[in-house]
Amino acid sequence: MSKLFVIGMGPGDLDLVTPKALSALKASSDMVAYGYYLDLLGEICDGKQHHDLPLGEEIGRARLALNLAASGKTTALISSGDIGIYAMATLVFELLDQQLQGNESHPEWLNVDIEVVPGISAMQAGASRVGAMLGHDFCTISLSDLLTPWETIDKRIHAAGEGDFVVSFYNPVSRKRDWQLNHARDVLLQYRPASTPVMIGRQLTRPEEDITFTTLGELDARQVDMFTMVSVGNSESRHIVNSSKHWIYTPRGYSKKL
Amino acid sequence: MSKLFVIGMGPGDLDLVTPKALSALKASSDMVAYGYYLDLLGEICDGKQHHDLPLGEEIGRARLALNLAASGKTTALISSGDIGIYAMATLVFELLDQQLQGNESHPEWLNVDIEVVPGISAMQAGASRVGAMLGHDFCTISLSDLLTPWETIDKRIHAAGEGDFVVSFYNPVSRKRDWQLNHARDVLLQYRPASTPVMIGRQLTRPEEDITFTTLGELDARQVDMFTMVSVGNSESRHIVNSSKHWIYTPRGYSKKL
């Protein structure tokens, strides 16, 4: 049976790539990935046949990975972060589902042994770099309305506000999308204070990492680009300062006992 | 400056422990951890001074870690999963905050260099084992009302339903808590179909791993214990079967383009 590894390579720091991800990559002869991620990984990709398609060609990339694996090549479909979180893994199974329903003509895909390897996601990288932002109930919302109707996204931001979840925004802005993050901020301000701590984490765990501590009231999409993760605390999250060191944590509720 | 590593060791499979976690552990002379996790880790803990306190003594464990580090011993406070997600990291910063506010008498804590190392959390382990359950917006809710008022938890379950988030329930049951999960199921059933796919993942990625595929309508707390993660799909999540292989994925919205 041919094999397709679907691998999350973590946020960027090679020390956050799991041994499982690394050995899956090593076992593969062929690799399907957006080129930028490969630059981060460096020499651990040496010797692999590299297949790429432009950003935006996600469906083509998932098809290519299934086709390569079905042709007998042990294949690694890779992404940064956790490939199961807003990334390519779901597309592989969506294509498989289409084949099972008879909407594709690739019965050979059904013989591919698929293994998904999780990775450290950007929200975790960010939370750990600033302390413990995800210490209590949280949610993630992608602000990209390319595939999801804006009404659905807007409903989720309201729900996040009502539930007082810590919120991590994936895809907060892009070159063509600049207003969604400020809208999300304004929605959350209906539910939690302007002083709520916010982390803006750019290129997390990478050499050019840049982390900004701000508040919900001060958050502005102009501070954010496509390489940035924005996490907003819940109404109890705290920004504390110990000498020059800043931290954000979300308490679990131990204060009664302290 | 003395050093405290706050380390998430992943769900159990040693191949999911990051190199960063491993080297932080290696660099430590002293280790504070609940014994059960150490059994999972095996020999990588050999040679460390092991400090433990019973389950439930989380505050004591965080204090102990800060005290050891402040006394000059490079210390590792460890947990399974991601220590930043419903785990010990937040308590370390809560104690630090108390000290900064003058409510503790441990100024030496302020000289400890704290570094948090994230890990693969149970929801990620579960999602990857069944395919791509976290492919779109999701939230996590702890069902433990030991520290959080039940009203807050209940509000969050309703918000998760309204937002149609994929929901991962942490601490779904315990010996003393057996009704919360069924209540959560009944709340979610007000918002999404009884046919919604559910994963019950016990001892994920460990030798005794056991995964059950069920539906929201069939979910029953009697199927669940303290070593179990329960993830509920959103209204679009799909359970598919390819020969004997079961998968759950949450589509991202590519279907329009397929």
Image (cartoon, coloured by chain):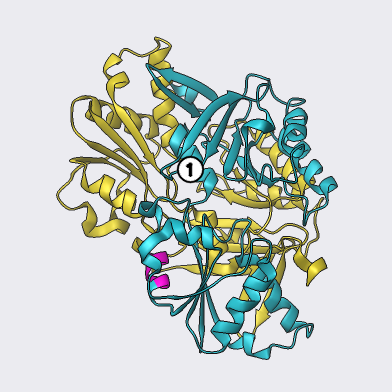
Chain colours: A yellow, B cyan
Q: Where in the figure is residue B191, as x and y percent of width and height?
A: 74, 26
Quarter of image, res B227: top right
Judge by depth and name the residue closer to the eye, B191 or B38: B38
* Residue B142 point in image, percent of width and height: 69, 48
Q: Position of residue B98 (x, y in %)?
A: 75, 78
Question: Quick check: is A199 in the magenta stretch?
Answer: no
Which range of residues does the magenta coloring cover? B20-25
Q: Is residue A225 left or right of residue B102?
A: left
Where residue A198 sits, quadrant-wise, is: bottom right
Q: Chain of mark 1?
A: B
Vertical placement of residue A115 versus B6, above or below:
above
Label tally: 1
| Residue B34, above or below A164 | below
User: Eyeballing the image, is A229 above or below A149?
Assistant: below
Any part of residue A38 in sight: yes
Q: How busy is the neighbourhood of tag 1: few (under 14 within 10 Å), some, or many (20 plus)?
A: many
Q: Residue at x 40, y 14 (%)?
A: A100
